[in-house]
Image (cartoon, coloured by chain):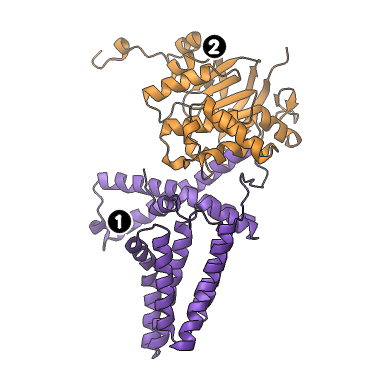
Chain colours: A orange, B purple
Amino acid sequence: MQPLIEVRNLRYRYEDGTVALKGVDFRLDPGESVALFGANGSGKTTFVMHLNGLLGAEGGDGRATVSVCGMPVEKRNLAAIRRKIGMVFQDSESQLFMPTVLEDVAFGPLNLGLDPAAAVERARTALARTGMAEAAARAPYHLSAGEKRRVAIAGILAMDPEILVLDEPTTFLDPPARRSLAELLHNLPQAKILVTHDISFARSICTRAVFFLNGAVAATGSIGDVVEQFGWGFTPEKNAPGR
Amino acid sequence: MHHVVLERWSRQSSPMHRGDPRVKVLNLLVFLVVLSTAHRDLVQIAVALGGLLCCAIVWSRLPLMGALGRAAVVLPFSLAFAGVCWIAGDPTRGVHLAVKSYLSALAVLLVVSTTPLPALLRGLESMGAPRFLLMVAQFLYRYLFVISEEAQHMAKAAQSRGATAAGMMGRSARFRAAAGALAVLFARSYGRAAEIHRAMLARGFQGHLETLAALHFRKADLALAIAGMLGPVALRFAVERFC
């Protein structure tokens, strides 16, 4: 079976000299949902930015080290790859840049070459799927954090991607909004990559976890095993003050 | 959450609000040319044109006093130059400058308050305004609120640690702190711009911002165009001929 995403020996160094990735290997199969865990600065976000070419790789042997749906992530494939991967950023404020919700969700379909009527139809369908149909005419800055996140996801779904990449999707969300987001994502058929620190949220969506440590993959396996291995589990009794 | 008065006004309903943005922009241009080229009997012409604007504001169901007050935002600048003219021995020129700038601001306010920004930008685009400039205007408008909120968060953080506006006065160390805060705000804005660009690329942006709806020119727009263009010209002609 051909993997949706295959990454081999991915390395990356920022312009200031910081080494962010040190030879990452990764694979995502169709229908799979994977959580990426790791401390702040461990390279998770840098890694996912490579999946649709937002950051360029410095492969060790000079050949493409990242491929999506069989296409190497290179300039000539970027348009096609960005149709396959929908990326939801950590801060939805950066993702919602159009004057109204409907125009924002239609931004992607219009870039795919759809005519305005078809783009609007796609946008309305995506807003309905995320429960935000009523907000179509509103300005994005009038929405709550949870609503912004849903609209950001609608903007991605409107492009009909095969893979969803979500970077810290529960940031700024209160528990009801978090629960409703988990239900929404759980019901979406796409393969998913979830960058998160939220173990319980990841459990509700993903079956596998990858743990990043200092720019490298330190472990991969079931969420329970990975969490246990790195002591990321949180039990109230164990962590209560005074114990 | 910010409540933007002009944004709220522009989303109201009136015959003026329903007008084609291109017609409103053309009417505005005619008004500005009529006003700026008037020299003889300027006070009478200003009264007549000001009355015309007041009628249009009332017809647009906008609060008259609120609009008159908001247009006065230009007065500190124009009065400064008017003062310079006065000191230079040409008080008439100073009065003309102040009157023309205030009425021009009121006319612009009327157009902006009766046309949602997306429609206004779409109208300007169809009239041949540079697309890149309009994109900059759109993003500036959208993220002005975000940057303003970030500035307010920083101000609150400073206040919570004892900073006061009065304490800033006359203390060089605190001026330096304020300058540092401005630098941080600039850096954050720059970072935000980079994030937005990445989010746009991730949704297939290739340098051209597509728009959804086309503009429609109706019979009512023809009437608005005739009234809006002939009104100021006829008033000036009448004042210059009969006063």
Considering every residue shown, the one lying at the far bottom of the view is: B89
- Please name whichever residue, A101 or B56, is drawn nearer the observer in this view of the structure: B56
Measured from the top left, where is residue A134 in percent x and y?
47, 33
Residue B141 relative to residue A4: left or right: left
Q: Nearer the viewer, residue B91 or A133?
A: A133
Q: Which residue is mark 1?
A: B174
Which chain is disc 2 placed on? A
Q: Amino acid at mark 2?
A: Thr
| Residue annotated with mark 2 | A207
Cα separation, mark 1 vs mark 2, equals: 53 Å
Whether residue B219 is visible to the viewer of this picture, yes or no, is yes
Same chain under badges 1 and 2? The reply is: no
The residue depicted at 40 percent of the width and 75 percent of the height is B78
Q: Quadrant of residue B202?
A: top right
At label 2, counting other C-alpha atoms closer than 10 Å, the crowd grade (few under 14, some 14-19, many 20 or more) is some
Q: Amino acid at mark 1?
A: Arg
Q: Is residue B44 above or below residue A215?
A: below
Give the foreground label among 1 and 2. Answer: 2
Q: Is residue B102 visible?
A: no
Residue at image location 61% in from the left, 33% down from the top: A121
SS type, badge 1? helix
Q: Quadrant of the N terminus of chain A?
A: top right
